[in-house]
Image (cartoon, grey):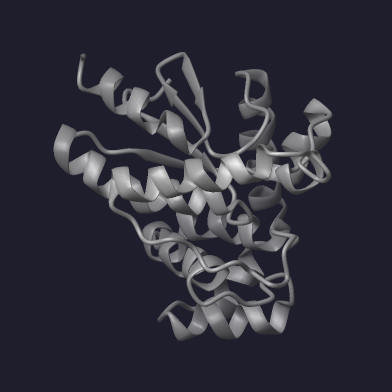
Amino acid sequence: MSPNPQFLFDFGSPNAFLSHQAIPAIEQRTGVRFEYVPILLGGIFKATNNKSPAETLAGVKNKPEFQKIETERFLKRFNVKPYTWNPFFPVNTLNLMRAAVAAQLEGVFEKYIEAAFHHMWVEPKKMDDPEVAGKAIASSGLDAAKLFARAQDPDVKAKLVAYTQSAVERGAFGSPTFFVGNEIFFGKEQLREVEEMVSGK
């Protein structure tokens, strides 16, 4: 178990992106570093019989409107910029998440996370198109060819499966999910509770 708060993320989640933007200020305030754990959201949904908010909110009166209000509050509270909706959503993130594991092994994890989130939610692109993704990641100064090639290694694939299965076993059903020790928190709004817990409040 990690002594640091863990952030289970998938690049396909806009709320994971907003959480990612909010985390640096929390780290600064608390002096605690978050451990980023790549998971495959599609795998978690499948294992837990869950669906994306886009599906579950379809046709529900008032709830999507409330979620927009909640997001506005989050942006103000954590002083972060809104995401740009990705017109290709939902994006299949399997290769992106495998490449995140490859980036861990190659020692460029943080740089890769910044790049992938940027090209999903700041300057959105069709990141499940291998050619588009390769050019985007390379434009951020990374060896995209090397990362996406290593993403196909059996050990990398197995590691992503293991992260995802472990997340489900610990209680996760979506992203963003956070763990502080054994305590689970779900959703960007619960970053307040995460911060309180790591601050000892």
Q: Residue at x 30, y 43 (%)?
A: 77
Q: Residue at x 45, y 70 (%)?
A: 115
Q: Residue at x 59, y 61 (%)?
A: 99
Q: Residue at x 21, y 15 (%)?
A: 200
Q: Is residue 174 left or right of residue 21?
A: right
Q: Position of residue 175 (x, y in %)?
A: 59, 39
Q: Quadrant of the N terminus?
A: top left
Q: Position of residue 56 (x, y in %)?
A: 79, 38
Whether 164 is drawn above or below 180: the answer is below
Q: Is residue 123 left or right of residue 94?
A: left
Q: Quadrant of residue 168?
A: top right
Q: Position of residue 145 (x, y in %)?
A: 59, 79
Whether 123 is drawn above or below 107: the answer is below
Q: Quadrant of the C terminus?
A: top left
Q: Position of residue 188 (x, y in %)?
A: 47, 38
Residue 43 visible in the snapshot:
yes
Q: Pick whichever, 18 or 110, lies toward us.
A: 18
Residue 158 visible in the snapshot:
no
Number of disc labels: 0
Q: Is residue 78 left or right of residue 134?
A: left
